[in-house]
Amino acid sequence: MNYRSSELLEKAKYYCNELSKHHILSKYWYELALVLKGSTARGNSDQYSDIDLVFFCDKNILDRIVKDYYDEGLISREDGIFLPLPEWIGHYNLESYDNLIGYFKEKNYPEIWEYTNVIILHDELNRFSGIIEEYIDYVFQDVIADIKDKYLNLQLTLDWLRHPLKRGDELSVILHCSNIIRLICQLSYLIDEKTYPHDKWLFYYLKETEFGSRKENKIKELGKNIINNSIPLQVDKELDEYSQYVLADGIITDLKNQIQLKYGNQPWLDEWYSFV
């Protein structure tokens, strides 16, 4: 944990104690869990980071707290709470345990990644930690199905890239290549049976995956070569004359080999067009 994270963590603990004295929250404190998430919890805070606190509780408790806040004029909305800490050093919001369980059941990988990389500040009933422990193994019970879906989407996006390249549609090329990079990164995590973060951190942590550690520079090269501002995109060229396509196709081929090495020769790897 870097110095900035340690500094913010101590402040988060301070605000945890202050919130425990809040005239509304204190009435429900025993039934609440409070976690610190984000870069501060992961230990890589920088000058742009803040304190991101999330309360968890049962839905009926959440509804009562929201009503209490609303009735006292502390919030102007009736569907939830999102409030700043003093001087906007951070903020806090409330979620239900049902939402947390839903992230696992729906395989919402970015949210699972987020909430399995937290620091628990208060969880007297062990509800939050108990849910994480109970549902974490559920996530990768059928990971090959998720890998297949993303791989087919990846191949289809590469196939669609042909047309905007040949038409010289630069904006569409940017959109397709960006989606290709996102899918490659997401697959890199799933192949290792790891959840993946939101886009903001997707490439940052890529080197922690086996594929990403080997192909990080190649993926970065693809990103840098999506559009060359000094040379207009040429129309009606052969596909092997477009560096974007060649780079993407090469990375996808390597990714296919990585999947095959770990999960065997799946029929949809080579004949993907028969499965979309």
Image (cartoon, rainbow, N blue to C red):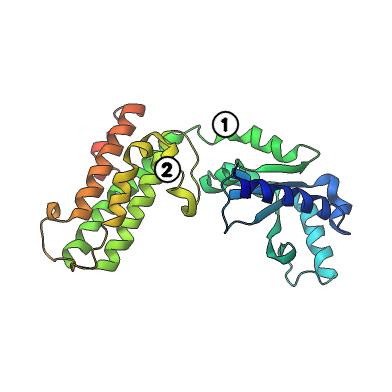
Can residue 272 be seen here? The reply is: no
Instruction: Say whether marks 1 and 2 touch (CB < 8 Å).
Output: no
Q: Earlier in the sequence, mark 1 or mark 2?
A: 1
- Residue 74 place in picture, x, y as percent: 80, 69
The residue located at (85%, 51%) in the rendering is 28
* Residue at position x 76%, y 36% in the image: 126
Q: Which residue is mark 2?
A: 206
Is 1 displayed left or right of 273 in the figure?
right
Closer-to-camera residue (134/215) = 215
Q: Looking at the picture, how far across and down is residue 19, in whole percent? A: 81, 55
Q: CA distance from mark 1 to mark 2?
A: 22 Å
x and y, in percent, of residue 207 in the image = 41, 40
Above or below 176: residue 195: above
- Res. 190 in view: yes
- In the figure, is residue 257 to the left or right of 59? left
Q: Nearer the viewer, residue 31 or 84?
A: 84
Residue 230, quarter of picture: bottom left
Tell me the crowding category of disc 1: few under 14, some 14 to 19, or many 20 or more residues within 10 angstroms, Cα based.
Answer: few
Tell me the amino acid under the disc marked 2. Answer: Leu
Residue 236, located in which quarter of the rendered image? bottom left
Mark 1: which amino acid?
Answer: Asp
Q: Nearer the viewer, mark 1 or mark 2?
A: 2
The residue identified by callout 1 is 137
